[in-house]
Amino acid sequence: LIVCALSDAHYVEFTFSDGARTRIRTNFSDVERRLTVFDNFYRTARGVLVNFDYVAGINNAEFVMKSGKRVPITKTAVTTTCRKYAEYTFTRMRME
């Protein structure tokens, strides 16, 4: 149910599919390590994790989430990130 996780100083803000947000004091690298074991979570920029299951599209180096929220993609990793998202999407389509 996690849509994305954004790091801010020593806090990580989680946004959930119902629109709720929770901010906790934790180490982002720990959150990243725990979530990226799942194929649907991907680091798009420093301190930013996105859940591919909640992405509606990509526009100007940002993921546009189904909720309308925009999540940044590092400019140097746009090609790699878009490729990873496409691979994930096609894998999901084949499984269905």
Image (spheres, grey):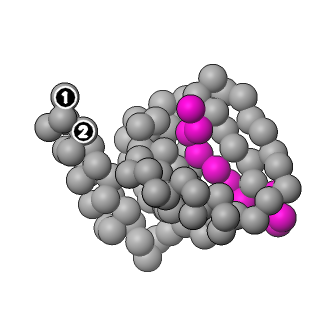
CA separation in Å, label 2 and label 1: 6 Å
Left or right: where 28 falls relative to 89? right
Can residue 14 be seen by looking at this rendering? yes
Identify the residue under disc 1. 96
Identify the residue under disc 2. 92
Left or right: where 47 falls relative to 89? right
- Asked whether disc 2 touches disc 1, contact meaning CB atoms under 8 Å apart, the reply is yes
The residue at 49%/58% (across/down) is 36
Residue 20 in the magenta stretch? The answer is: no
Task: Specify the principal SS of the magenta part.
Answer: strand
Secondary structure under the numbered disc 2 in the rendered image: helix
Left or right: where 61 falls relative to 23? left
Secondary structure under the numbered disc 1 in the rendered image: loop
The residue at 32%/52% (across/down) is 85
- Three-letter amino acid code of the residue under disc 1: Glu
Corner quadrant of residue 4: top right
Q: Which mark is residue 32?
A: none
Q: Single out the residue that lies furthest toward the left.
A: 94
Can residue 48 be seen by looking at this rendering? no
Pick the quarter of the image with the C terminus: top left
Q: Nearer the viewer, residue 81 or 33?
A: 33
- Above or below residue 52? Residue 81 is below
Q: Single out the residue that lies furthest toward the bottom.
A: 76
Q: Position of residue 8 (x, y in %)?
A: 78, 60
- Three-letter amino acid code of the residue under disc 2: Arg
Q: Position of residue 55 (x, y in %)?
A: 43, 39
Residue range in magenta is: 1-11
- Above or below residue 38? Residue 8 is below
Q: Nearer the viewer, residue 7 or 77?
A: 7
Left or right: where 82 falls relative to 23? left
